[in-house]
Amino acid sequence: MSEAKRRAVFPGSFDPITRGHENILRRAAGLFDEVIVAIGVNQDKQGMFPLEQRLQWCRDTFADLPHIRVTSFEGLTVDFCRSVGAGWLIRGVRNGGDFEYERTIAQMTKLLEDGLETMILFTDPEHAPISSSVVRDIAHHGGDVSRFVPDAVDLGALGD
């Protein structure tokens, strides 16, 4: 009988992926046999960047880590975790506000799926002020976001 894989899911919109996301995921990658970057799709919410572009950015960012898989999903995160056999959810926290929000989500997740554990990792301090929403705002107004996103993210190539 083979040993069960330690599989985790890192869900988010990654609109776009930031250096903070990359920091969390690279650190989490050493803790699990497989990590799935799961881009949630909400039909009622249009992202700034197309889903296919976000998927590609994530794949390119983690191309050097073969045990990281990138995909998308619709519906509840707990249902997706169940469908891929994941026992852990990875969440990143930048500040106290993030922590309070993530604690509530983790507690609700536990009520929905008792066997699913949430692992909260704090971003390294230099990434704490970076959020996708701030990056989107800077990009929308023509600012340079290159130091806030992984090298694989080339917003200039999109041609706004």
Image: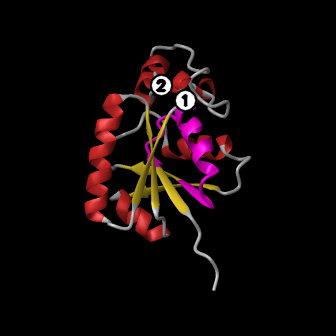
> Do tag 1 and tag 2 residues touch (Cβ < 8 Å)?
yes
Question: What percent of the width, then of the height, locates residue 104?
Answer: 26, 46
Q: Which residues are magenta?
A: 11-36
Which amino acid lies under the numbered mark 2 shown in the image of this protein? Ala
Give the quarter of the image for residue 133: top left
Q: Does 102 sit above or below residue 111? A: above
Which disc is residue 128 wearing? 2
The structure residue drawn at horizontal position 47% and vertical position 25%, both measured from the top left corner, is 128
Q: CA distance from mark 1 to mark 2?
A: 7 Å
Horizontal side, residue 98 vs residue 123: left or right: left
> Which image quadrant for residue 149?
top right
Q: In the rendered view, does 133 fall on the left or right side of 27?
A: left
Expressed as whole percent of the image width and height from the top left, the position of residue 160 reads 52, 24
Which residue is nearer to you in this view: 37 or 114? 114
Residues 12 and 153: in front is 12
Q: What is the quadrant of the N terminus in the image?
A: bottom right
Residue 21 is marked as none
Residue 14 position within the rendered picture, expressed as x and y whole percent measured from the top left: 48, 39
The crowd level at tag 1 (other Cα within 10 Å; few <14, some 14-19, many 20+) is few
Is the residue 99 above or below the residue 76 in the image?
above
Q: Which residue is mark 1?
A: 124
Q: Secondary structure at mark 2?
A: loop
Residue at 70% in and 50% down: 65
Query: Dot 2, how many residues are within 10 Å of its Cα: few (below 14), some (14-19), or many (20+)?
Result: some
